[in-house]
Amino acid sequence: MLTIAVSKGRIYQEALPLLAEAGIVPSVDPDKSRKLILPTERDDVQLVIIRAADVPTYVEYGAADLGIAGKDVLVEYEGEGLYEPLDLGIARCRLMTAGPPGRPVASRRLRVATKYVNTAKRFFARRGVQAEVIKLYGSMELAPLVGLADCIVDLVDTGNTLRANGLAPQELIMDISSRLVVNKAAMKMKHGPITELAGHLARIVSARAARER
Amino acid sequence: MFPFSYPADDRWLLPEGIEELLPEEAERLELLRRRVLDRFAAWGYRLVMPPLIEFIDSLLTGAGHDLDIQTFKLIDQASGRLLGIRADMTPQVARIDARTHAGDTPGRFCYLGSVLHTQADRLEKSRSPIQFGAELYGHSGRASDLEIIRLMLEVLTTAGVERIHLDLGHVGIFRGLARQAGLTGEQEGELFSLLQQKARPELTAAVASLDIDPPLARMFTELVDLNGRHGVMERARECLSEANAAVHMALEELAVLAERLGDCCPEVPVNFDLAELRGYRYQTGVVFAAFVPGYGREIARGGRYDDIGKVFGRARPATGFSADLKVVLRLSGLGESFVGSGEAIFAPAVSDPALIAAIRELRDAGRIVIEALPGQQGDAAAHGFRSELRRNGERWCVCPVASKDT
């Protein structure tokens, strides 16, 4: 039995067609069910639906053999217990800094609001900037408006939310897309089924990329 | 502040990652400890007990940054020098071999004891593992690698761990490729960590950014896929055909080792992973690890680390493995509890030299006897004893405890 951890929302919606092409179709719709473990039409594969930031934890512990997680979550997790062999090319966006346009650079310590605490610290340290990171769980855009922070670090897709709140994207930290992650022990002990599935997904992803080109 | 907070008196709380074992678990752990040490002894591995604490310079030799962070430190009031509480016993055993083992004969040592870590383990959440392991010094080559792997498998099996999978790799393959490509330490470090994550997209990009020959670049990226049960070595020989002699030697070593393992432990599934480089900084040859279903990472690991004794004045070939007895305890299928009050004998609170002699005789024979205290609550039946000592004329004998209803 292979257990795949997927987070609800955009990643799930975009992963579904990929998984379906690989023959994995959940037999229950997670939006209509309260079930957290979804059987699929393949007897040997099940999905667990969890929060995005929890995917690396489930996979590192071996509670799930595989997972689909955004690169943003993986970079923030800082774990060494995972393999991330495949870029699925879905749920693409950018991790950026953003702030009110035209505001002069503060001469004191920069205050940054984000849910990506580790990533933000590392980014500003590399820039040689002393930054104080304030952990928030959502609505990051509000922080500069109310004087809680000078800027934010967050995912940017269209940039509409930023603009609607009078903020502008500033620096690109990294391009983000979802990865296939694999538990290290599962990779050793379920090598056959896992490499087969990963190989199948890799072929689907490169065929898609070829079509887009 | 919290709707349910800790009681004001929380003196009973233990520090994070520090635990105590209650009788049931402590007794099982002790059973495992004896079994493990007995098995080491049966293979001729001599027990050493390195100190809990020693000068930091000797604890951290060749180990690198991670062990430095993991080590609790304090100042020695006697010498003014920095002391460390051991976070890993391997360097201590290396020091023992280098300083005390005379001659060039093979040195076989085993150890078992508590170590402390400053950072809690990600999976176990523990900062106080009980580390055990074995080291074989003074022999270079397949035979000693094979002996240590067989010993690891046998010790784990003796400790009640079942369905063990073995993972095999060789640090000489990646190291040989890095030398051939003339990588700087920094570049080597970057490729190393990407290989540990099997992060193929990042690895491909990183290799492309290096100014190296296309065949070498291809070999680095193909290393990610050189893993699995069957046919890996054949694929590796093909993929790495343009590599230098060191890489070919490493491949050959691994292939022969795997063949020998197949002969002596045919029941153990062997997985190869040529990009798995556990302990890359100090390992010099074959690396291996044991996995079991239901546990997210290796339960024991080891490999060859020749020259570890160099800083202590004597470089010898070395290979060994180590594991955490607390993890083994959790995965072990050995008896839930091997000593319990059910098997103990209850002795009444009677002042009689004959009773004392009878109790002594039973204890000498390895039985458990618990003496009643005058005026204590509950009799033998109430405490769940199945047998008790009763006077029969001049003599005391062990009789079944009568149940209350009769």
Image (spheres, helix red, strand yellow):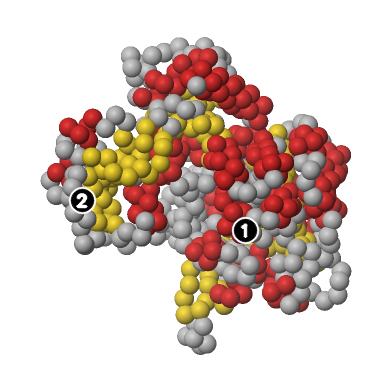
Q: Position of residue A70 (x, y in %)?
A: 42, 34
Question: What's under tag 2, amino acid-wise?
Answer: Asp
> Residue A55: x, y in percent?
43, 34
Dot 1 corresponds to which residue? Answer: B184
Q: CA distance from mark 1 to mark 2?
A: 39 Å
Q: Chain of mark 2?
A: A
Taking the image as shown, residue B290 lies to the left or right of residue A37, namely: right
Q: Residue at x 73, y 77 (%)?
A: B313
Residue B187 shows in this picture: yes
Q: Answer whether residue B402 is visible to the viewer in this image.
A: no
Please say if B315 is above or below B223.
Answer: below
Is B142 placed left or right of A73 in the picture? right
Tell me residue B108's x, y (percent): 79, 64
Q: Which residue is mark 2?
A: A150
Residue count near mark 1 (Cα–Cα under 10 Å), binned few <14, some 14–19, many ≥20: few
Q: What amino acid type should be assigned to the residue bearing mark 1?
A: Thr
Say above or below: B316 vs B349: below
Q: Toward the viewer: B232 or B84?
A: B232
Q: Can you tell which of label 1 and label 2 is closer to the viewer?
A: 1
Q: Residue at x 36, y 36 (%)?
A: A94
